[in-house]
Amino acid sequence: MKYLDRDLSWLSFNGRILQEIASKDVPLLERLKFVAIYSSNLEEFYKVRVASHRFAQKYKGDKRNKFGYRPSFILQQINTIVSEQQAYLGKLFFNEIVPEMTNEGIRFLCGVVNEADQKLLEQYYDKHFKEEFKVLEITNDIFLELKNQAIYQLIIDGEQQYLLEMDYARWGRFITLEQNEDYTKIVQVDDVFKYNLHKILGHEAETYAFKISRDAELYIDEEQDENIVKKIKKSLKKRDTGLPCRLLFNENIPFKHINSLRKKLDLDMASLIAGGNYHNYYDFFGFPEFEHKPHLYYRRDKEIACKSLDNSLDWYQTIGVKDVFLSYPYQSFDYVTRFLKQAAEDEAVEEISTTLYRVSKGSEVGMALEKAAKSGKNVFVLSEVLARFDEESNIYWGERLEQAGAVVKYGIDKLKVHAKVFLIKRRENGVLKSYAYLGTGNLNEKTARIYADHGILTADERYTKDLDEVFKFLKDEQYEPHFKHLLVAPFVLRTKVKKAIRKVMEKAKAGAEQQLHIKLNSLEDPEMIDLIREAADAGVKFQMVVRGICCYCPLTEKQKKNVTIVSVIDKYLEHTRIYQLSEKETYLASADWMTRNLSSRVEIAFPIWDASVRGLLLKQINYQSNDAKKARLITPEGDNQLVKGNNKLSSQQYMFELVANL
C-alpha cells in the first residue's frame, strides 16, 4: 500500500466528528450540532465522491485510480465503514444525547410516545395538518420522480403502498408541542404524521422513512454554444434529477418492499444503505435554541480587537506603514469588510479587483463592490462559478454586480480560481498606490465566524506587484505572469515548495537538524507525499497538522519516526494553511497539497515577513500538534487516537492568547 485512498481517509475524518459527538467535554447541544455536521458531510460525500465512483464503475470500467484502488473495492469499503459509523451514531444519539436532553428539560420525542403525547400529537394534527398530508397511492404503472435528499414515508397497508413527501421546507421539521417552566416538549413533523396515520387512512398501517441521494456533479455540455453561466443554470436544474447513488431506508422495512422500490429507481443492491427511523440529521443545525441554558453551548468568546486599526484615524496610512495581520474567528472579519466599504466610498479609490469563491446571498463584500461599481469605480470580479453548491449564489452576485457596472468574469478556462484576495488602487499625490488583502479563507463574513483562518491587509509592493500580475492573468488568460514573492499555482507554487524542501534535505544530509512545520486541510498529492517520504528518509522531521484527507502512509522506519501528523477537530473548523519551510520562510496559503490545488487551480501562498507573526504561526502548529484534548494522530490504521499530554486548554483556546498578545 503506497498511499491511503482519499475517500477512505475522508471517512476517517468524519469518524473524528463522531468522536466529538461522543465527547462529554463538548456541551450537549454542541454535540447535537456535530451530529448535523457529520450528516451534512456524509450527504455531500455520497452526492459527489460515491457518485463519481459509481459513474466510473458504470461508464469507465472498474479501473484503478491514482492511489491504486478500483471503484468496486472503494464502494464496498465505504458501505462497510459507513454502516458501522451510522450504527454508532444511532447509539450515541438515542442512548446518550436524547436522554441527556431529557435531563435538561428538553423532551425530544423520538418515537417514544405515551397517551398524553399521543393526544397532543392528534390535537396538533387537527389544528395544523389536517389538510396538509396528501398521500399518493403507488401503482405498478406509476412513475416515481423522487426529489434529491427529500424524506419520504413509504406506507404499507396490506398489499397497497402509499407515498408521502415530508415537506420540511413548508412545514418545518421540529415542532414544539408543549412548553412550561419545567420542560419543553419537541417532536419531529414525521411523528405528527405517523401518529395520525389512522386519521388519514381510516385505520392503522405501517410506515417507513427513506430517501435518495443523487449525483451532484454538474455535467456541462462543452459543445453547446452558450456562455458558462447559461450552461451552469441548465445543469443546476438537472442536479435534483441526477443519477441516484444511495437509497437510505429504515432498516425495519420488509425487504420485498425496499427491493421493489430499488427496482423502480433502477438502483443496484450496493446502493442500499440501512438507517434508522429518521434521516437528514443535518437538519439539527435548525434545532430550537435554548438561550436560557448557556451551559449547553460553547462559551461565546469575545472577539479580540485589532488595536492598530481600532486606534487609527486613517486605515490607509496605518496599513501603509505596517501589514495588519488578522485571525478569524478570534478577531472579527468585519475589519476586512469595513476596509472594502471605505474603499467603495473613497473618491480617491479608482480600481478594485477581487476573487470570489464562496459568497453568501446577503454578502457585505458583494454589497461593498456593488456600491463601488455604482459610484463609477473600475471594479473587476472573478466569480468562480464552479464552486460546488455555491454556484447559484456566485451567479446571483455576478449578475448583480454586472448590473451595477462591474466587469465580471466567471472563472478561467480549465482552471478553478480558489485564491482569496482583493487589490485596491488609490490615487495619492497623483500616483496610484495599491492596497491588498490576502487570506486563507473565503471572503465570506458568515463562514469567517466558524472557520479558523488568517489574512493580512497590506500595502507592501512585494505583495501588490505580484498580485497585480495575478489579476492581469485573470483578466486576460493569454497574459504570461511573472512572480517574485507570491507562490502562485499552477505556475510556480508546486516547484517552489519542492525546491524549498529539497534545500532542507541537503542540509539534513550534511548533518544539520532540520524540521518543517506544515498545516493543511488535505494531503493527497502523490508527488508531494513521495517528496515528504524522501525528505524524512534523509533525516528531515515533519510536524504536520492535516484536518481532513491524508493519503500519506510511512513505508520505512525513518518515515515513521520523522513524520508526525495530527488532525484537530474542535469548536471552529480548522481551515488555515501554513507552510513553514525554513526558519525565515513561512507562507500562508489558500492551497492544500492536493493535485487539483497545485495543478488545476489558481492558488496563492504568500510569505510572512513579520517575525512576530511567523512566531505565532509556528506556535499554532506546535500547540495543535500537542493538543491532548482535540488532536488525533493520523495513522494508516485510522484509529484516531488522541495525542497524549497534560495540557489544560485546547489549542484553539491557546489561540485566543496568541492573537491577543500579538
Image (cartoon, rainbow, N blue to C red):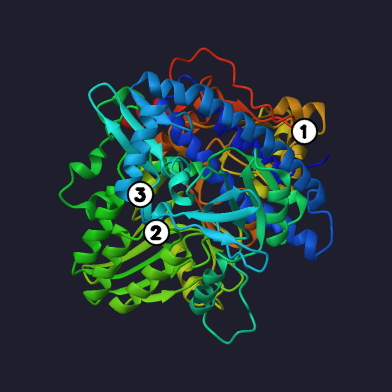
Graded by Cα atoms within 10 Å as few (under 14), some (14 to 19) or many (20 or more), the crowding at tag 2 reads: many
Secondary structure type for disc 2:
loop
Q: CA distance from mark 1 to mark 3?
A: 38 Å
Q: CA distance from mark 3 to mark 2?
A: 9 Å
SS label for mark 1:
loop
Q: Nearer the viewer, mark 1 or mark 3?
A: 3
Q: Residue at x 74, y 33 (%)?
A: 536
23 or 139, which is in the foreground?
139
Q: Is residue 359 above or below residue 474?
A: above
Locate the C terminus and report the quarter of the image it occupies.
top left
Distance Cα–Cα, label 1 vs label 2:
39 Å
Q: Which sits earlier in the primary sequence, circle 3 or circle 2?
A: 2
The amino acid sitting under disc 1 is Pro
Residue 359 is tagged as 2
Q: Nearer the viewer, residue 156 or 201?
A: 201
In this figure, which residue is indicated by the disc labeled 3?
Answer: 446
* Amino acid identity at mark 3: Lys
Please identify the quarter of the rendering in which residue 219 is found: bottom right
Asked if residue 223 lies left or right of residue 172, the reply is right
Res. 554 mark: 1
* Direction from residue 71 to residue 159 in the image, left or right: left
The N terminus sits in image quarter: top right
**x and y percentages locating residue 423 in the rendered image:** 37, 63
